Image (tube, rainbow, N blue to C red):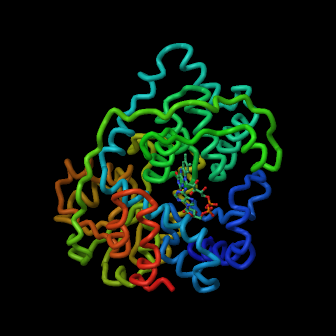
Amino acid sequence: MDVFKASEAELNWFLAQNLKQYSRLRNFDFGPDKRNNVSQLSKYISHRVIDEYNVVRATLGVSTFERAEKFIQEVFWRVYWKGWLEHRPTVWSDFVAFDQQDKLSSQKDNKNYLAAINGETGIECFDFWAQELRNTNYLHNHARMWFASIWIFTLGLPWQAGAQFFLKHLLDGDAASNTLGWRWVAGIQTMGKCYLARAENISKFTGERFDNARLNERALPLADEKVHVVQPIDYEVSTKQKFETLLIMDTNLNMLTRNETKNYKKIYVMSLANASRQIAISQSVVEFKQNLIKSAAQKHPHCEVLDAREAKQVLGKMPGCDVCYPFIGENLDFLHRSNDVWNIDLNFLRHHEDLFCWRFATKGFFNFKKNIPAIIKTLALS
Ligand SMILES: Cc1cc2nc3c(=O)[nH]c(=O)nc-3n(C[C@H](O)[C@H](O)[C@H](O)COP(=O)(O)OP(=O)(O)OC[C@H]3O[C@@H](n4cnc5c(N)ncnc54)[C@H](O)[C@@H]3O)c2cc1C
């Protein structure tokens, strides 16, 4: 399978068949067998098999902005979350430092937690989604919101443990969208405003598949004790090649299709196994990532798949290499940790599209959204 062709085919299918309905139907979760109302592209976009800008470009190739506005906005939510986290790296490092065993040490807490992840709480919709996530490695956006809300406000479990559970099983598991999505539901992302799942809303938007869930619909938002100081991004950083070797992590795979890679003598592509991660992922997610990188590597004649142990042998001996910047998350943490030992010059290359968009991601999404027409124009996406 050529992943680039597969993702393009799925995108084109969605644009031709389902884009028109997206704005009207996207909030409905009709169940795992009826997903035509959403694109299900996130497993590709989160690994940048196809990137956000090309999704928007393809969309505007077949539609006016007005007709596709809702879909384009959703795609830009992802760019926005990424930029927001880049400005506040401590939000990620605090989340990763969360010690699940310590925080769920009492017998009661641990029992509730196990019931939640095994789908045995007795709340029908929640149990269904826990199983759906484990079996299909995907949840509809609305189900993610309801699930997170029930986890936090009805079951009283820590949001961080829920976000770890998502990262373990989602094919599209992503440091920014996941961590900030959970914080948003909890009420610590938009301070003082949480998302409360309501039984009536669940019934309506699941086509009445789930009725009469008994939920805590009156909870107050959680409070974040810590202030995360905004750290300025260096917009003057290099986007230029410095070395003859390029390293690409599994968050940037379409770099292999870009013209810039033609000048490299050697390209390595990597996806981290659990031994190199802080938050373990399930076997099916590991295999999905392995298949993606194997297929992507075939795109370039000088590309080779590397694992973490080999990386030490291969990269540790070089004076330096270019690295396609993998964003805040597991991959970047791994590179920083490893480079304490390798001690080589890692020349991180950013995409100019990301750098341009992240300027607008310091405040809320409303502020970012106002700039979408300017982004489209400047980046020539239409
Ligand atoms: C608690 C919670 C956790 C989440 N965790 C992740 C995650 O780990 N990885 C992830 O990619 N998304 C995450 N999301 C966002 C969203 O749920 C998924 O991107 C979306 O459901 C993917 O399905 P789709 O491709 O069919 O989306 P579509 O509705 O078809 O949207 C198209 C694309 O837009 C982007 N997008 C849509 N909605 C959002 C959103 N709210 N935030 C960010 N990007 C969005 C995605 O790239 C998606 O593929 C999370 C949301 C919540 C509430």
- When asked about the image quadrant of residue 130, the answer is top right
Q: Residue at the location (46% across, 67% down)?
A: 369
Asked whether residue 330 is in view, the answer is yes
Look at the picture and state if 124 lies above or below 77: above
- Residue 136 located left or right of residue 75: right
Residue found 42% across the figure and 80% down from its top = 258
Q: Give the residue drawn at x 60%, y 71%.
A: 7
Image spot of residue 104 (x, y percent): 48, 22
The quarter of the rendered structure image containing the N terminus is: bottom right
Q: Is residue 169 left or right of residue 240?
A: right
- Give the answer, above or below, for where 183 lies relative to 362: above
The residue at 72%/65% (across/down) is: 24
Place of residue 149 in the rendered image (x, y in percent of width and height, measured from the top left): 59, 37
Residue 112's x, y, as percent?
Answer: 60, 22
Instruction: Return the residue found at the far top.
Output: 107
Q: Can residue 301 be spotted in the picture? A: no
Residue 29, given in percent of the width and then of the height, sits at: 73, 52
Q: Which quadrant of the figure shows ligand 1? A: bottom right
